[in-house]
Image: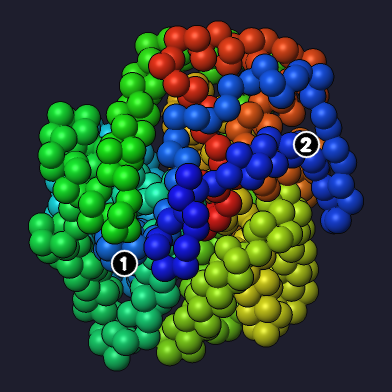
């Protein structure tokens, strides 16, 4: 046992601290009121997370530097959202696109991103994380160039295809790489950086609309798009010259000496390199055993407890997009124009203000998620989005005041960033236990991107059919339905380990089989496979 000393970079977690972490009862709350559930299953029957290192490590400068470099890749997605918020009208006028063609062009990036996510998994498995960063940046760069040179719809969609593939690769590889180079206690916090980068990219995209406003329309959107090559070019350089390969992948490929050299860079001086290396080896062994023992039947023929988990996790992932974030974000210019805000400079200024406020609220939410709890922030966020949509709906039904529209959009975007953005991805990762998490999260991602594509591809058609007033009223109703869903089904996961969540779902469904499954698979492993989320996910991934 090493006594913690100031400046040594790490200390041992005591047995008392570990014991305290197992005493959390599952609890739920709504607007401050708490409800507690205690499982009938004994805590002692569940395995404890002994395979992870018992040593607490501080974040080193190298980890921060490499995580920052990796997170910059996510700026690409944010920039894509930001520029097309301002450029979509310009593209439609320049190339003579119909509303349907424009909707398909905007929304298809989510479909292509799903393909990119699958490609990322294959490339990162075969050739490593660094190669995947390079491939992601290069594909996105090609997409920007093809799009900027487009003179017809087919070329435009070809460029969109490459952009979507690049975005999908980035969405998958960024958090994976950051989590693999980070000490377990800080993974949640560091993964947050890539999500902040998305929102910074959105602001930069909005800013480009202002900077290039003096240009003629047919040139303005092309310059905005081609400016997108800057960040992937930087990422390609950083991938070649700065960031190291993931130690997880190096161990997987049997390159132990290289893995040790990387671990030595990542951890504080005096850290037990062999302990970290053995932890990675055991983790890889356990993942392989889980893959062999758990098939898709666990998802498609679930027990009552797993079914409840899937309802909560998939419902939350779907709710993030079904409540309209992509639809409103991509078409804010159209909304502003319909209330009389038509000047490029005025539109760009409002977009930048909204983007900056959105980033500020995400930062606030990230710092206060543990204080207020996931459940409360998610419900408060959904409630705020519902009220915003009601305000916008009545404004379009009545006088279409520009000031009320601006207030409604600001309130909607900041409400989303308060809870729906960060919690919608964090919460599913905290409720799916290890054996089903990879498959369940991939299903949640698929559902989320499908609804994103659906919402973004139907906005103009819906507006032409029913008008903005009815459209926002429909979104308000959807927000209300999801608010009810969150109140009824969403558990509080703050401070909970995956063991605690398994006990919670076993208790409320009366399904003890989930505990038996954990114990059964435990006997197949060389070390316990349920890992704690009390540290790894205490911070957030903010979309």
Give the answer, above or below, for where 362 lies relative to 219. above
Please state which of residues 371 and 420 is positioned toward the viewer in this rendering.
371
Does the image show residue 459? no
Disc on the earlier residue, 1 or 2: 2
Dot 1 alpha-carbon crowd within 10 angstroms: few under 14, some 14 to 19, many 20 or more: few
Residue for point 36% across, 76% down: 204
- Disc 1: which residue: 61
How much space separates mark 1 and mark 2, taking CA atoms? 36 Å
Residue 314 percent across, percent down from the top left: 59, 34
Residue for point 38% across, 81% down: 207
Residue for point 58% across, 63% down: 366
Q: Are marks 1 and 2 in contact (CB under 8 Å)?
A: no
- Disc 2: which residue: 25
Residue 507 percent across, percent down from the top left: 79, 22
Residue 301 percent across, percent down from the top left: 58, 10
Residue for point 49% across, 22% down: 528
């Amino acid at each position: 046992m090493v006594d913690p000393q100031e400046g040594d970079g790490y200390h041992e977690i005591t047995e008392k601290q570990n014991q305290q972490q197992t005493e959390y009862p599952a609890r739920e709350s709504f607007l401050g009121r708490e409800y507690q559930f205690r499982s009938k299953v004994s805590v002692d029957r569940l395995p404890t997370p002994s395979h992870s290192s018992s040593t607490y490590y501080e974040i080193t400068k190298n980890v921060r530097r490499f995580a920052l470099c990796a997170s910059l890749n996510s700026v690409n997605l944010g920039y894509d959202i930001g520029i097309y918020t301002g450029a979509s009208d310009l593209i439609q006028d320049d190339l003579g696109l119909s509303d349907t063609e424009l909707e398909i062009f905007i929304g298809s990036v989510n479909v292509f991103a799903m393909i990119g996510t699958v490609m990322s998994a294959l490339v990162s498995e075969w050739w490593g994380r660094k190669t995947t960063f390079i491939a992601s940046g290069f594909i996105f760069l090609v997409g920007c160039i093809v799009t900027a040179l487009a003179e017809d719809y087919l070329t435009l969609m070809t460029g969109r295809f490459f952009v979507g593939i690049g975005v999908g690769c980035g969405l998958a590889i960024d958090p994976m790489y950051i989590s693999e180079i980070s000490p377990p206690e800080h993974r949640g916090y560091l993964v947050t950086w890539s999500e902040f980068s998305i929102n910074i990219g959105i602001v930069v995209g909005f800013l480009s609309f202002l900077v290039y406003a003096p240009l003629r329309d047919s040139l303005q959107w092309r310059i905005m798009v081609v400016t997108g090559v800057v960040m992937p070019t930087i990422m390609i350089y950083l991938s070649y010259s700065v960031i190291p390969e993931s130690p997880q992948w190096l161990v997987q490929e049997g390159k132990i000496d290289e893995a040790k050299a990387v671990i030595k860079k990542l951890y504080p001086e005096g850290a037990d390199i062999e302990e970290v290396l053995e932890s990675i080896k055991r983790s890889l062994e356990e993942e392989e055993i889980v893959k062999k023992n758990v098939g898709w039947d666990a998802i498609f023929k679930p027990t009552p407890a797993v079914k409840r988990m899937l309802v909560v996790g998939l419902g939350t992932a779907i709710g993030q997009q079904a409540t309209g974030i992509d639809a409103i974000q991509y078409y804010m210019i159209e909304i502003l124009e319909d209330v009389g805000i038509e000047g490029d400079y005025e539109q760009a200024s409002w977009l930048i203000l909204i983007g900056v406020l959105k980033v500020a609220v995400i930062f606030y939410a990230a710092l206060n998620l543990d204080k207020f709890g996931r459940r409360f922030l998610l419900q408060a966020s959904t409630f705020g989005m519902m009220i915003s949509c009601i305000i916008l709906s009545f404004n379009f039904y009545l006088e279409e005041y520009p000031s009320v529209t601006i207030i409604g959009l600001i309130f909607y975007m900041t409400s989303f960033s308060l809870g729906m953005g960060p919690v919608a991805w964090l919460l599913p990762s905290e409720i799916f236990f290890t054996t089903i998490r990879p498959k369940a999260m991939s299903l949640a991602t698929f559902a989320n991107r499908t609804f994103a594509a659906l919402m973004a591809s139907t906005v103009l058609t819906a507006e032409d059919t029913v008008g903005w007033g009815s459209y926002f009223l429909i979104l308000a109703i959807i927000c209300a339905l999801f608010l009810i869903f969150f109140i009824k089904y969403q558990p509080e996961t703050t401070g909970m380990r995956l063991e605690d969540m398994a006990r919670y779902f076993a208790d409320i469904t009366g399904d003890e089989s989930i505990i038996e499954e954990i114990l059964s698979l435990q006997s197949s492993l060389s070390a316990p496979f349920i890992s704690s989320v009390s540290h790894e996910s205490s911070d957030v991934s903010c979309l």
